Image: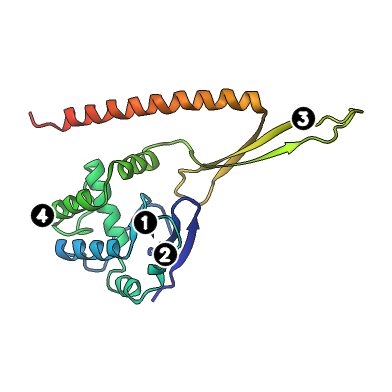
Amino acid sequence: MRELTKNVDAHNGPAEDLTPDETSSPEPQLSPVLTPAEFRSVLDEIDRLGLTWTSDLPPTVVARDGTANGAFATEKFDEIEERYPTLPNELGYVIWYALTGTEPVPHSVGSEEDLQAKAAIVRETIITPAFQDDFLFRHMLKLPRFENVEWEVIVKTSESGVQRFPGNAYGLVSILLESNSPYGDENESFTFAVNASRLTRLITVLDEMRDALHRATNIGECLKRSIDAPD
């Protein structure tokens, strides 16, 4: 059996990569696909272990509460991985279809009836509004995405050409960006300095942007309901 790769994410906790680390898109599988009953059963088993799925393609398993989870070391989890080695790829196809309407390659998830049944299952068990928002944001953009921020505060004690003790305080902020490239890790970061007054301005602008995003999200949901409504 292929060895699992464990990752630790600052936001989602430890993650189990159940799929070959080749590209960010699921590949067609030669193994038999799951029946809708098997599909629901294994998703329920993973949920009972306190685990959930990320919005990656293929999805990976993380602890639901974002902390270290002993479920990864259990015999039950190993049994699931042994029984359903192609589940993440198949799940990725189904989620992509459920959220975009684009049908997967033939035979990747079973018949058309199987696809519809599995799409209904993921809409019920996995696709929350937060999951949908993160999935579409992650996979529908051409730009690098905000991933994390790191900061530190400094008191300057000396400076070239300055005779007196400066003593001014300022912060360094590093913005970490996640690349959307499927061809490897091309993440990047940039760093800038900020003092207290400029930080206050920045927070004010970000608060305004957050409020605008909340309003835009509500508008988007209304538009989607209108478009999806039967004629």
- Which label sits in the foreground, 3 or 4? 3
**How far apart are the two marked residues, 3 and 4, measured between alpha carbons?**
67 Å
Please report the residue visible at 38 percent of the width from the left and 76 percent of the height from the top.
1
Say if 9 sits above or below 38 in the image: above
Q: Residue beneath label 4, please?
A: 113
- The disc labelled 3 sits on which kind of residue? Asn
Distance between mark 2 and mark 3 Cα atoms: 44 Å
Answer with mark 1 or mark 3, whichever residue precedes in sequence: 1
The relative height of residue 126 versus residue 71 in the rendered view (above or below) is: above
Give whichever of discs 4 and 2 has the lower sequence position: 2
Query: Depth-wise, is mark 4 or mark 1 nearer the camera?
Result: 1
- Viewer-side residue, 10 vs 136: 10
Asked whether the beta carbons under mark 1 and mark 2 sit within 8 Å of each other, the answer is yes
Quarter of the picture containing the C terminus is top left
Tell me which label, 1 or 2, sits earlier in the chain.
Answer: 1
User: What kind of residue is marked 4?
Assistant: Glu
Disc 1/disc 2 C-alpha distance (Å): 9 Å
Tell me which residue sits at (35%, 74%) in the image: 78
Q: Which residue is mark 3?
A: 168
Asked whether the residues under the numbered discs 2 and 3 touch, taking CB atoms below 8 Å apart as contact, a structural biologist would say no
Is disc 4 surrounded by few (<14), some (14 to 19) or many (20+) residues within 10 Å? few
Of callouts 2 and 3, the N-terminal one: 2
Which amino acid does the dot numbered 2 rest on? Asn
Which residue is at the far right? 163
Q: What residue do we see at 30% from left, 54% from top?
A: 92
Q: At which x and y percent is residue 68?
A: 45, 62
Provide the secondary structure element on which disc 3 rests: loop
Inter-mark Cα distance, 4 to 2: 35 Å
Residue 69 is tagged as: 2
Q: Which mark is residue 64?
A: 1
Q: Secondary structure at mark 1?
A: loop
Q: Nearer the viewer, residue 41 or 17?
A: 41
